[in-house]
Structure formats: C-alpha cells, structure tokens
Amino acid sequence: MFIKSIVKRFIIIDHSLQDLQGHHYECSLSVAYAAQRRGYKAIIVANKNFSSSLYPNNVKVFSVFKVDWFNNSTQSLNIIQKQLKKFIKNREDVSFIHWIKDYQEKINYQFFKLKLSQPKTRGFLEKVEGSLFRLMKWIKDDINLIKHIPFTNTLWGIFKIIWGLIRFSFKIINKVFYQIIEQLVNIKSDSFIESLSQTLNSLKITFDDHVFIHTLSIEQLEEIFYFLEKQELNNLPQYHIMLRRDIDDCLVKNAQGIGIKACLTQFYQCKLFPTKVRFYTDTPQLVDRYNSLSPIKLIEIPVPFRQKIIQEIIKKNIALELENQSLHLVYLGDARIEKGYLYLPEIVADLWNDYLITKKVELLFNLILILIREKKVF
C-alpha cells in the first residue's frame, strides 16, 4: 500500500522501465536523484516486470504498469500462447488461387533449372513447355466457346453465385477461427491510463506534487488529456511531459486518435497548459517543430544520465596514466536527423587519417533504426 508523504513528491512515470535496456533506467534514476537534491521525495512508477533487484537505493519504486509506451502488453505468455502467437504471425494465404500460382511458379523454375543444367535436352524441354502453353490456350478457347451454348450464361452465373457463397462462408469461418486464437493469445491488461489513475489515487496525489512522464506515445498523451480534463483543475499536481519523437516520425504521423496537433491544441484550450501541464523536448530543432503545431510552447531539456559515473571513469583513466589508449567517441540512440546522425560520415572522414588509422580515436555507433511495416487490409 502506498504511503502519503508530508514533503512534496516528484513522481516519475516510466511504464516501459522493465530492465537496464534503453534509456529508461538511467533517465528515470537521474531525474529521481536530481529531484532529491531539490528537496523532493522521488518516486519511480515502473513496469510490472521491473525486478526489485534493480531498485535503486534511497528511491521508492513501485512496479505497476502492464503495458509499455507502445500500449503492448508486457505480461509473459505461457507455452501454448507462444505457439499460437507464432502460428498467427507465420500464417500465409492458403487460398486455392494462391496455391495454383505458387505451383505454376515452381514448375516454371524447374524448367528453367533443367535448361541450364541439361543443355542437351533443352530443345525437348522447350517443346514440352510450348505444348503446355498451347494446351492452356486451347482450354481457355474452349471455355470461351461454351458461352455461346444456350443457357450457358445462366448456368455460369449460378455457378459463380454458389462459388462466391462458398468462398464467403470459408472467409467468415477463417476470420472467426483466427479471432478466437487471438483472444487466447492476448492477455487482458490494465491500460496505461487505468494503471496511472489507480497509482495516483493510491498515492493520494496533491497539488504540491509533480508528475514527470518522459516516454509515452501520442495515443497515451491523448488518454492523459481526457483523464485530466475531468479533474478539478486546482487539485491537480504539476505534470511535466516530454515529447521525444519528431512530428514527421511514423509513430507520430500514424498515431491513432485525434493526433498530436489536435491533442496539444486541446491542452491549451482547456487551460491545462501552462498552469498544470508543461511540455518538453530535447533538441532546439524539435522545440521549433512542436511549437509550430499549436499555441503551446515547449521547453528544451536534455535526456539526462548520471554524469558522476562518467567523471569517475575519466578520473580512473587519468590516474592509471595509460599510454597509447584510444579515446572512445560513442553515438547512442535513434538514427535521427536532429540528433546529428547525418554528420557521422563527415566526422569519420575528418578523423580518418590523423586519428582513426593511428587508433588515437575509436568510434562506436549504437544506432536504433525503427522500421514500420504497413499492413494492408483488403
């Protein structure tokens, strides 16, 4: 059970914090320690999968959320559910037409392969291939001649209707079958906003507290808006929301709901901004991009990490006085334009002769490329 504190609290919401991967752990801890230095009681609200063995010292942590910032369930599947999920993922179109085309392509490939591997029988194979082609043409011509027989159109129409009904029935059965499987695979999880609401109620949040959310989707931002507009404005804590993706990013442009522009406008029109909600991002370019969408003005802040650890490593290296030790330059995170990704080739070219070849400097690029596969629905 959550215990209310007398001092003002700084609550960090990181529903994707499950382990040490990514920026979540370092970012949340850095903010928590900074809040403590300013006299706040820091609280981190993480994902349900975040192990207590990773809890930091002197910072209260609650593992609550069951979804990540993609709104995907983070609860583990059992063996049967894993197999069903794999079956759904790998399913293919097994229609009769697809099977015929696939079979025809295999035959054509075998003819092509035999022509190359057996040059002596190439003439014979070409005659067989030509004969099959003419046979298919004759069959099509005969089918066209059938249309001239009395009542053929009527019989053909009846056949197409029956065939269409059979195909439609199989599609319905197939759809229902896979829906049942998907229901077995999907685990009912509390949504992001449900978990957030329950957590804030348990903490008995007050207007003196601060809530910081540094990683969330546009859909979750919209959920926060609908949640806050129903609350009494004067009783709300101060919310700090960080938007980290470019407005042209696929995850932003293709977001479900009203979209980022309308969402920010709603925050402004309902007077949640700037009295109770403030927005941030991490580069000057992103500030300008987001500021162009609505009257809301974002503030530039860094994605923090504990610099003290880096400083200790540097001191150790200096103390060791190791000669011929390379200087390591590291690029971490998303391959995004506003973070200088496009300048990497120029940096490599400028350092090549004097530093890279001589091994005075070593470069490490740990890039994250996000590919969005579009799903077409027919």
Image (tube, helix red, strand yellow):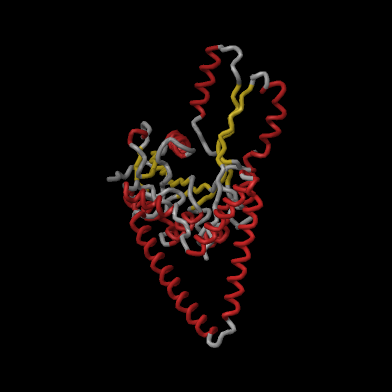
From this view, report whether residue 58 is shown above or below residue 95.
Answer: above
| Left or right, 190 with reference to 215 | left
**Residue positioned 58% across, 81% down in the render:** 147
User: Image height check: is 61 above or below 266?
Assistant: above
Nearer to the camera, 225 or 357: 357
| x then y, percent, for residue 137 | 62, 68
Instruction: Give percent across and percent down for residue 232.
Output: 41, 60
Residue at 45% x, 78% y: name it. Answer: 162
Q: Nearer the viewer, residue 275 or 184?
A: 184
* Image point (42%, 59%), residue name: 227
Q: Position of residue 26 (x, y in %)?
A: 46, 35
Q: Nearer the viewer, residue 371 or 163?
A: 163
Residue positioned most to the left: 1
Residue farthest bottom in this picture: 150
Identify which residue, 373 or 303, lies in the foreground. Answer: 373
Query: Can you say whether 113 is above or below 105 in the image?
Result: above
Quadrant in the picture for residue 150: bottom right
Q: Is residue 354 above or below residue 140?
A: above
